[in-house]
Amino acid sequence: MADYHLDTNVVGAGRWSYESIDGTSVGMLNKGGAGAFAADEWAADTGKPEHAWFVKADGSIGTDWRQIAETYTVPDAADGKNVHITGSFTSPGGRFRVLVSHDGDPNTIGNPGAFAQLLTYTGTATNFDLNFTAAKGDDILFVDDGVSTWWVPGKLKATVTTELSTPPAVVTATPGAGSITVGDAVKLASSTAGACIAYTTDGSDPTTSGTAKTYGTPITITADTDIKAVAISPTGAPSAVTDLPFVLNEPFRAFAGVNQAGTTGLASNLQWSRQDFNWGSVEPAKGQIDQAALAEYVRQFTEAKAHGETILPVLGYTADWAANRTGYSYEFHGKTYTYGPVTGTQGYNFVRELTVKDASGKVLSDQTAQTNIGRTPPQDPADYANFVKLAVDTLKPLGITYFQVWNEAYPGSGFWEGGMDQYMQDIQLPAAKVIHAAGAKVVYGGWICGAPLSEYIALLDKWNAWKSIDVYDMHYMPIGTMQTIYAAAQKRGIKNPSVWQTELGFTTEDKFIADIYPRVFEWALSKGGANPDQVKLMYFANWSPNDSAAYGYNRTLYNGSDLSAKGKTLVTLASLLRGTKAETYTDFTTSPGLKPELNEALSTANGFRLDDKRVVLAIDLKRQNQADIFEDQTTGDTIHLNFGDPTMTVTLRNVKNVTSLDRVDLFGNRTPLTWKSVGRNAIQVQVPIMDADPTVHDLNQTENEDVFYLSLQQG
């Protein structure tokens, strides 16, 4: 970058301007004012007393106690470089400052936000030699204020250069930031020869933090760790700080996910999110790829990966140019639906004639209808297959393995304006072929909850599609149906089927997660497979506005920036089930008797052993009548859940060196319990059923169900 020498008035690559400054507010000097100052507010002539400020080409600046800033805006070419500022300032007496405004906009002066102060001097003369790492659009302000006699100007001589050595290359990590296995070692490096690396593991800035360490050997990761690292060149120039968050791979984190969670990490560091990868956005016209839109998807998926998050892309929906405009027909539930050519559009919909006939050919209806353009089948199925290939070729290099084909394709779902045979033939099977050819995996697009599961099974049978699908996915289904589809897949030769629900929840029931997730997680672990992606639940959705009138309010994990009650229960459960190793724990009994149940209408107790050090029991007591009496269906024992201080007896076996045993409520409040030994490596405890916390107590009372946990720690 060309230097700007203020004392010789050489114009360089940056942009210079003169401005007034008041606190953190900056504005260009303008004409106007009042009284003696009702003229131009700056000029190059010291002989006109009506001017409150002046600037001369030789570097002289004058003021009558008002602040004036001579501003240099860093050009694009200096982005990330070390800016070197040298010069001198003389004055009959006043204050001189050098400030940096990180507004980041090379085209805007006057809205800088907070200033970083490089130098403050009060007196008559000073020299300065300053360095800082710049970003394009930063403003360097040379501020002259508080001069005792404005008509005797101070003089600034400043040179702005980038004469310091180019900053070293930023620090990179192997493996890259994101999810990692406990015990793995992270290597840090900078491609700049001779650069040393400083780093922190507490999230602080390694350029200033007292906890910074000099990197020597690889860093072993044993917990979630946010490494921040900076490379320092032999000349002392620092690189930009690299943020390298690492999140441990853990079974529950891989099991639980959310929809539409963004790309910078999830509540409790869950490792899966789900979002659309939109055909029309990346291919607005046939064969015309929007590289900027594609790059934005790459950025989002890359950023998510760097925070330990994997995004499941949903490959839909029909691009406007690709939608069928000539007409089509399909059979569904004994009727034939025939859509005529498009006669017009209304908003996002096609207008066309729809004729419905029964099995005998009798016309049942003939009327004008609308079909959503994006949900209309493509005119040429090959166009969708080409889009799928583009998506896979773009995202697979980023580590994306699973690709979901469409979403809730079913007549009347609002996501598919065609028939199921049409969907299988034109969408599902061609997409699966493309995805498998690339070595990736196919997730069925979510069987809609309003359609019978038997119809799903029959559809896959009809098209011999079981082995073309790697994940059998459903939405908002009773969790017992996951076992049904699992068994159906096994019957058809799939040894270890993967079953997901990529949408469930969206409910006002605050205990939904606490009720459902332990049941399904225990069921998943009981399969004993080595595939951490065999079973997943993804809550819909992550966020809604904190407005009771907003769509989704009190049905999501966050209301605005605040965790909802459901979000809090997820955080509690995820905290309890932390661990890089998780397995079922069945060496317990309860009185009244409970056992694992997928049937959501039944009470249940689900046990987990984590890292061979902790045991967690998730207990769910359904109230079975208006008297709030729970009946043990096996033994006939009863317990009155709303009388006195009811307790239940829990016996835990095969536990050694127990150091603590707590009752944990839905929001994570812990109550230490006293246990007794009832044999070798076995203990027994009386567990209060009612919650001490009034908010949680009311929550359980309102939803007529008691959910709580036991958390045992072994020495």
Image (spheres, rainbow, N blue to C red):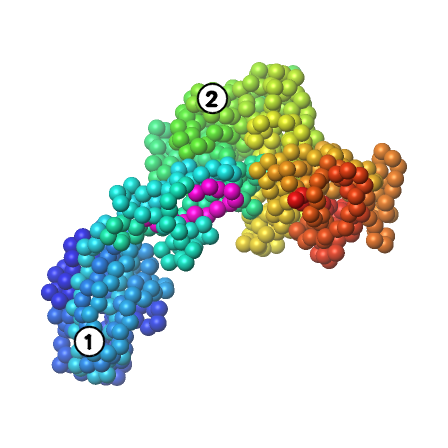
Residue 268 locus on image (x, y percent): 56, 46
Image quadrant assignment for residue 454: top right
Question: Residue drawn at (34%, 69%), measured in percent from left and top?
Answer: 25
Question: Residue drawn at (43%, 23%), measured in percent from left and top?
Answer: 438
Disc 1 to disc 2, C-alpha distance: 73 Å
Question: Residue drawn at (76%, 35%), measured in percent from left and top?
Answer: 595
Note whether residue 205 is visible: yes
- Look at the image and tell me in which quarter the C terminus lies: top right
Left or right side of 408 for 243: left
Asked if marks 1 and 2 touch (Cβ < 8 Å), the reply is no
Magenta part of the chain: 219-231
Q: Give the number of the disc on residue 633.
A: none
Magenta span: predominant SS is: strand
**Along the viewing direction, whichever of 260 and 130 lies nearer the viewer:** 130
**Along the viewing direction, whichever of 400 and 528 lies nearer the viewer:** 528
Question: Does the magenta run of residues contain 354?
Answer: no
Q: How many marks?
A: 2
Name the amino acid type tagged 1: Ala
Q: Is residue 658 above or below residue 407?
A: below
The residue carrying mark 1 is 125
The residue carrying mark 2 is 436
Residue 294 locus on image (x, y percent): 38, 36
Question: Residue drawn at (61%, 38%), measured in percent from left and top?
Answer: 611
Residue 461 locus on image (x, y percent): 61, 17
Name the amino acid type tagged 2: His
Mark 1 vs mark 2: in front: 1
